[in-house]
Structure formats: structure tokens, C-alpha cells
Image (cartoon, rainbow, N blue to C red):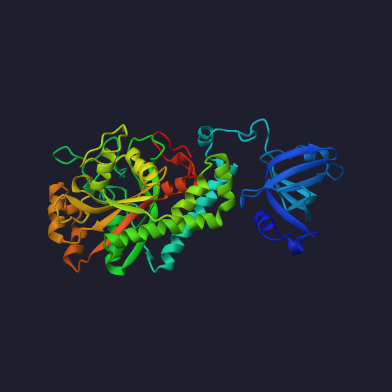
Amino acid sequence: MKRIKIVDLLKKPAGDLLGTTITVKGWVRTRRDSKNVVFIAVNDGTIIHSIQVVADTTKFDEALLKDITTGCSVRVDGKLVESPAQGQPVEIHAEEIEIYGKCPSDSYPLQKKGHTLEFLREIAHLRPRTNTFGAVLRIRHAMAFAIHKYFNDRGFNYLHTPIITGSDAEGAGAMFRVSTLDAENPPRTPEGKIDYTQDFFGKETNLTVSGQLEGELGALALGEIYTFGPTFRAENSNTPRHLAEFWMIEPEMAFYDITDNMDLAEDFLKSLVSYALEHCFDDLEFLQKMYDKELIARLKGVVEMPFKRLAYTEAVDILMKSGQKFEFPVSWGTDLQAEHERYLVEQHFNCPVILTDYPAEIKAFYMKQNDDGKTVRAMDVLFPRIGEIIGGSQREEDFEKLMNRIHELHIPEKDVWWYLETRKFGSVPHSGFGLGFERLILFVSGMANIRDVIPFPRTPKNAEF
């Protein structure tokens, strides 16, 4: 008999299936014994809710029923009937039960409820079976699909940019090296430096921190592109907002100025949050109940409110006059910290904020320079609870200005010659931004730690799974 997914039993009208014998397969979440009856909650991962299976103990072998424990996997054949219990439209009266895999109750780590998120990170191979992580992972899938749908519907091309690269797009230097050289005895140049000409790629290479620079190459040929892939930062950071491996969405658009860029970013975020509210509501309700009482209201607020736009200089003035005692002092020319960003969003404006025109000294070399000689056309989108969720800019299309900036920052011209050539051959105004996927999932799910919105977090001293 063909298996029916539990989501199709609980989210769609039972209709023609009522009174018929059906098959479900899944994992036992709970069992409860009553006189002559065992109530078994079965979940198959397709929905936050489980379906109740009612097993008459007189119809089943006692040894079989004894092995039906939390975590075991089963196949249930039975009659689908309307449920007399509140909160569930249907239940299954079991006619046959097969145990695929037993789950010893004395050693199964998820046997009991109430595990901390810290404990669950230690068993990342099992935590997707919990309600919390099932919900988060379904939301993560929905957001990934919504991202591809958004850009596809608007004519963007999905561009695959390299994971292994010879350039440092951000200029931060915190990169993971990729090498096949003997780690204990690498070849050396006459000057005593490691001779990367003998390495696999013939030069020093690393895992990418961003697909942006290569994405610009695509935009300057195809018009509008986006990337969606893994990126890596070798920062020794153990904060709830940082990972060593994470995913980035980076659209790049020819003929977009900074205003076009802000318009796209705002519409993009509103569209994604709307999709989550429409397609993930059961999971959001669960996460709201368990972790964040204001989650759904906050999501709806982002969709309904226009984002406030203002210049960095104005934001610094607001912060300096706020009377707040910040851990990190604020002055013009300093990079804003999460506490500053959240003050602007959560206390001063009470809505998402887009900051523009940052000091050139704290931004990357590729950002378009303003006429004042001090600022660049950068933009950061700030969200409640998260702070910066998107960072972007109008890109500098002028060859001479870009070259001067590269020299100022002592970036080796030989590493970015190909990037410079795009400004020599048919350059156009263009813009783009980057959205950290995990920060988006943090916001949409209401979770507090970024390690809880990616299946297998990579952080300092942690690559177990």
C-alpha cells in the first residue's frame, strides 16, 4: 500500500480517505497507554504536528507493542477516522504495525523532553528529529525556495561563483587556505617563503568569503544575476551571530544605482517574510509558543512597515544625542556595532532601517565614492533583534577611482587585474548586496543563536558532524 504523508492528512480535507485503510510511515514521538489501548504519536517530518495512531492491545502481539518506544521507526496500516480528540481532525485506528528500527529507551538521547539547545548542539546528528529543529529546517527550506523563486520571477540569472578563490573580496584576510602542499615540510622560495607555484593551483588559494566580485562579472554581461552558496570566514569568533561556514545570497545588477539597490533589498526582504507567513505558519506558531512570543507580530510588522532610510552621518548624530550608554562609544568614522544598529531599529525608529553613505575608511575598496571625498554609496539594512541583515553598495564603475582606491589600501593589482578590466571594457553603473542566509533564518524563526538555524554549525573547535 502506498504511503501517505502526514502533512497531506492533516492539512488537506480528509474527504475520500475517511473510512479507508491507509499507510503512514514515520518516527514515534510519544506513546501513552490506556486500558486495552495504546495511543502512538507518529511524525514523518513533513509537518510540525504528529498523527495519532490508536492501537487496540487485543489485536497486537505484546512484544511488538513493547518495542514501540519514542524514536523508533514504524509503518502503520489502519483506518482513517475522524478524531474525537480536540486539536486533531483525524486519527488512525491501527490494523497492522511494522517496526523498521527499534530505539532503546535507555540510551536514546531524545527519550525525554526539555533538552536545552546547548545539549542539542552536541547531538547535531539527532536534533533534526526534535520539533524545534524540524520547524527550523522546514523554514530554512522554504526560504531557500522563496529566494530562488523571487529572483527567477524577476528575470535574474542564477550564477555559480567559485568556492576556491585567489582573491579576498572583503580585504579582511580571515580566510581558510586551500593547499595540497606538505603541511610539515612545504617547498620554499630562496627567500624562505612558501613556494605556492608548486601548489595545486600554482598560487595561494583560499575558501571564498564572498561571490560578489565574480558576481559582478556576470552582471556586466547578463544584466541581473544572483549567487546563493556557501562562504567561509576564519575568524576566531564564538558569538551567537557568527559562523565559520555560512550561506550568502548576493544579487548584482547592471544599471542599478544605490536607490534601485535599496528598493530591491526592501522588496526582497518583505517578499521572503511574506512567504514564510503564508507557507510556514504552523512552524512559526510552534516557535512563537516555545521561544519568541512576539515572533509573528514582528514578521508582520516588517511586511507592513516601510523601511526608514537615512545617512550614516544622521544615524551617528542620533546615537550621540540618545543619552544611551553604549558598550562601544560612537563617533563619526567608527563602524556601528550591533547595539547601535538595534537601538536605531528597536527604540528610535521602531521599524527596519537602511543606512547609507558610510565613511570610505570603514568600507571595502569597490564601493562607489561620493563627491564629498569622504563617504561611499554603501547601504546596510538593519532589522530588529538582528542588526545588520544586508550589506551592499553601488559599485565603483570608474577605472581611475577604483585603481586609486586599490593603491590606497595596498591591494596587489595582480590579484584583481581581471576585476579592473571590467572597468576598462564597457563599464556601467551597477549595484549589489549580500544577505546572510542564516541571519535571515534567525529573524524568521525567532531563534537566538545562529548555530541553531544551520544543520551542522561550523565554529572554532567544532567540526564534529
* Front position in the image: 318 or 329: 318
Q: Residue at x 28, y 66 (%)?
A: 254
* Front position in the image: 55 or 116: 116
**Residue 365 at x, y = what percent?**
20, 51
**Residue 172 at x, y = what percent?**
25, 43
In which quadrant is the N terminus drawn?
A: bottom right
With 263 as the anchor, is 450 left or right in this view? Answer: right
The relative height of residue 347 versus residue 119 in the rendered view (above or below) is: below
The relative height of residue 233 versus residue 251 in the rendered view (above or below) is: above
Task: Tell me if I can see residue 126 in this picture.
Answer: no
Q: Residue at x 62, y 35 (%)?
A: 110
Task: Tell me if I can see residue 224 in this picture.
Answer: yes
**Residue 40 at x, y = what percent?**
74, 43
Q: Residue at x 59, y 51 (%)?
A: 282
Q: Toward which corner of the image does residue 224 lie, by quadrant?
A: bottom left
The relative height of residue 168 versus residue 183 in the rendered view (above or below) is: below
Q: Residue at x 12, y 53 (%)?
A: 404
- How many numbered dots are placed on residues in this image? 0
With 412 as the anchor, is 123 left or right in this view? Answer: right
**Residue 14 at x, y = what percent?**
73, 60
With 180 as the anchor, is 71 left or right in this view? Answer: right
